[in-house]
Amino acid sequence: MKQAKRIRQPQGLLTVRIEGIPASAGYAEGPLFDLDRPPAAYRSKAGAAEEKAALKAAIGKALSRLTSLVENADGDAAGILEFHIAMLEDDALSGPAFVSIGSGEPADVAWRQALDGEIADYEASNQDYFRARAADLRDIRDQVLRALSEDSDLAASPGAILYGTDIAPTRFLETDWSSGGGIALKGGSSASHVAMLARSRGVPMVVGLGASADRPTGNALLDAEHGGIVFSPSPAELEAFRQSSSSFATRQGKAQAFLAQPAVTRTGTPVRVQVNIAYPSDVDGIDIETCDGVGLMRTEFLFGKSLPDEETQYHAYRKVLEWAGDKPVTIRTVDAGGDKPVPGFTVEETNPFLGLRGIRLSLARRDIFRVQIRALLRAAVHGNLKVMFPMIATAEEYSQAAALFAEEQAALAMGGAAHKLPPLGIMVEVPSVAIAPEAFANVAFFSIGSNDLTQYVMAAARDNAAVAPLNSVRHPAVLRLIASVAAFGREQGIPVSLCGDAGGDPAAIPALLEAGLRDLSVAPAQLAMAKAAIAGVSV
Ligand code: PEP
Ligand code: MG
């Protein structure tokens, strides 16, 4: 349970300090913007015809806002916005509201009732995917309500700290972050879509601050490096905060000097630093000279609204391979399930993190897996491809997946299609593999997935703020497993890298190098800081 620390200042002002979990590193100082503020009151119209016209206009206004946002969005952000547009354009969603207006309800009440009914259905689902969609529907509901009440105070002022229970993706996308600002959430998760967006755009964000009885106003200090917020800060508090913030900015500035150089430790040991990407378009913003290749390309993005065909996949993989030239690109076969459900592919389960996810699902649905395998085999001729399998627990799973590659390769050869068999490796993220890696002496490489390995070793979900302190890669049990996998790789001549989020965390890097790792893969925005942290370690 979160404890708020309250300190009364000499002039009577009450300083409140609350700790949370950093989701995107940085500092922000500014006025609070209340994310939980209800929209302004709606002024009812003269009759049903006018109410209907008002709702129609409000939906139109929300749609045009979304359309202009989608123009500047890519990848994940574009996917979220397109879903919102599709929902708003669907008469099945707005139909019941227009019927209620016909029976005498004002537009705002009718719209809220219609949407709340839908939201309740989504929230009651036992599937994460649909529960996550409930948040999208709340976002859509509120956008139209704001348009209806002509809420002029829609945007946060530049540099504000957005504080509330949770934040809608559209709120993040329409906020102008160019003059600073940050996000402080009572709930939220560092694995959420907005947290991913915040990290890639360098917006400071803290989650898991817990519900607070206070309704703070005025200025606040957000420390998203260590995880915390201060309301009504004292002058001493303000000074200490500004010192930490400027030291962070200095470290970031200095880190830029490391970006263009290969990473080496203080004692001259070279360390490979690759990047993790989630969308082919991610590479557009990265200079290939600043990294040693792609250590993890996730492919779940392909499995959005429908299952992707072979051509779509082939072009997505080829784009990244051509961008990387002769540097390696490690593409992971689809890791659906768990925190990444895909309609029409993943199954309903009571405990999806321990269920049919990753390679287990791909082997259960070989029709779908074979399409991805063919696209990978064909794309392999365009660069230095390596392929890895997620959530491997047994050697048998690896052999079955490798056999499918051999079968599809033979079929492509028969048909005369250009293709190449890439080296096949595995993610080390299930404890069974890390404890007994000797069963995998025949794989081409290991890539340690510290996000999942940590949650399974510590029995602490990666997306649950309440157990975040337990979910630590620096726990001796996790580090010992990482060190033993690194040692096994050295003995057997099997390359070992790490592609979990810990690889980009300056606080975890010394321990990872100490554990014997010399190959990390990090989020592109973390490249400079990771290289700078490596330069400070003596191994
Ligand atoms: C991991 O588990 O560390 C990993 C890199 O994979 P993901 O975060 O996609 O599960
Ligand atoms: Mg994983």
Image (spheres, rainbow, N blue to C red):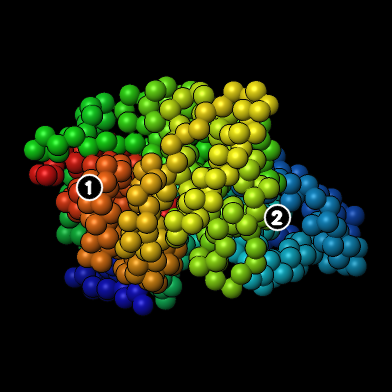
Q: Is residue 252 above or below residue 336?
A: above
Mark 1 C-beta to ligand 1 under 8 Å? no
Q: At 50% from the left edge and 67% from the top edge, which residue is drawn?
A: 354
Name above or below for residue 467 compared with residue 230. below
Residue 178 in view in this figure: no
What residue is pinned by disc 1? 491
Callout 2: 10 Å neighbours few (<14), some, many (20+)? Answer: few
Q: Secondary structure at mark 1?
A: helix
Q: In the rendered view, does 441 fall on the left or right side of 381?
A: left
Q: Which amino acid type is shown beneath numbered disc 2?
A: Gly
Q: Which mark is residue 344?
A: 2
Picture coordinates of residue 211, whole percent (x, y): 43, 73
- Picture quarter with the N terminus: bottom left
- Judged from the image, the quadrant occupied by ligand 2 is bottom left
| Left or right: where 123 falls relative to 510 | right
Does residue 22 lie above or below 417 as drawn? below
